[in-house]
């Protein structure tokens, strides 16, 4: 019974969701706006090496990225990409926007699905931690 590792939603966000969001932002900035890796890195406040790793799928989760592209949340990610490319957002606003995207994922149940996929024992207990506050 105690051989299964329980992970709180925040761990799933840090390990899976944030890297997937960053990867989608990087790819969108480069594909739609023809930004260089260096420009994308500056816009996101990460290193050029990190951008390279997002592009080559060393960071991020390609399966999760494809799932997010199919959801309404992808429009929010592209909206943030638009603001970054237009240099219309400061770093603190970008952080706030990423938090808003994660919050939307939590409220609409997307985070629960990712959490259940990663920690199947939670579905047996009908966990709803991700949906709370």
Image: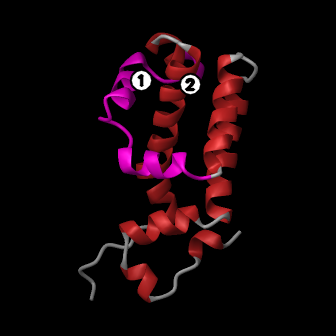
Q: Where does residue 9 sit, x and y in percent of width and height?
A: 51, 64
Front residue of 90/21: it is 21
Q: Residues within 10 Å of mark 2 (few under 14, many from 20)?
A: many
Front residue of 123/82: it is 82
Would you place residue 20 above or below residue 91 in this image? below
Q: Which numbered tag is attached to residue 44?
A: 2
At 45% from the left and 58% from the top, the residue drawn is: 11
Front residue of 103/4: it is 103
The residue tagged with tag 2: helix, strand or loop? helix
Q: Which residue is mark 1?
A: 51
Q: Closer to the N terminus: mark 1 or mark 2?
A: 2
Q: Which quadrant of the view contains residue 132?
A: bottom right
Q: Which quadrant of the view contains residue 120?
A: bottom left
Q: Residues within 10 Å of mark 1 (few under 14, many from 20)?
A: many
- Would you say residue 67 sits in the magenta stretch? yes
**Inter-mark Cα distance, 1 to 2:** 9 Å
Q: Which numbered tag is attached to residue 61?
A: none
Q: Are marks 1 and 2 in contact (CB under 8 Å)?
A: yes
Q: How many marks?
A: 2
Q: Is residue 8 visible?
A: no
Q: Is residue 79 visible?
A: yes
Predominant SS of the magenta segment: helix
Quarter of the picture containing the C terminus is bottom right
At 54% from the left and 62% from the top, the residue drawn is: 111
Q: Where does residue 92 sit, x and y in percent of width and height?
A: 70, 31
Residues shaded magenta: 42-71
């Amino acid at each position: 019974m105690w051989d299964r590792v329980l992970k709180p939603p925040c761990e799933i966000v840090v390990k899976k969701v944030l890297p997937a969001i960053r990867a989608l932002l990087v790819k969108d900035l480069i594909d739609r706006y023809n930004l260089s890796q260096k420009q994308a890195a500056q816009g996101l406040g990460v290193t050029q090496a990190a951008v390279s790793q997002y592009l080559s799928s060393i960071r991020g989760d390609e399966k999760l990225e494809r799932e997010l592209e199919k959801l309404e949340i992808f429009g929010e990610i592209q909206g943030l990409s638009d603001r970054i490319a237009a240099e219309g957002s400061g770093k603190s606003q970008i952080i706030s926007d990423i938090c808003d995207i994660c919050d939307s994922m939590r409220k609409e149940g997307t985070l629960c699905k990712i959490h259940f996929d990663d920690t199947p024992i939670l579905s047996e207990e009908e966990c709803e931690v991700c949906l709370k506050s």
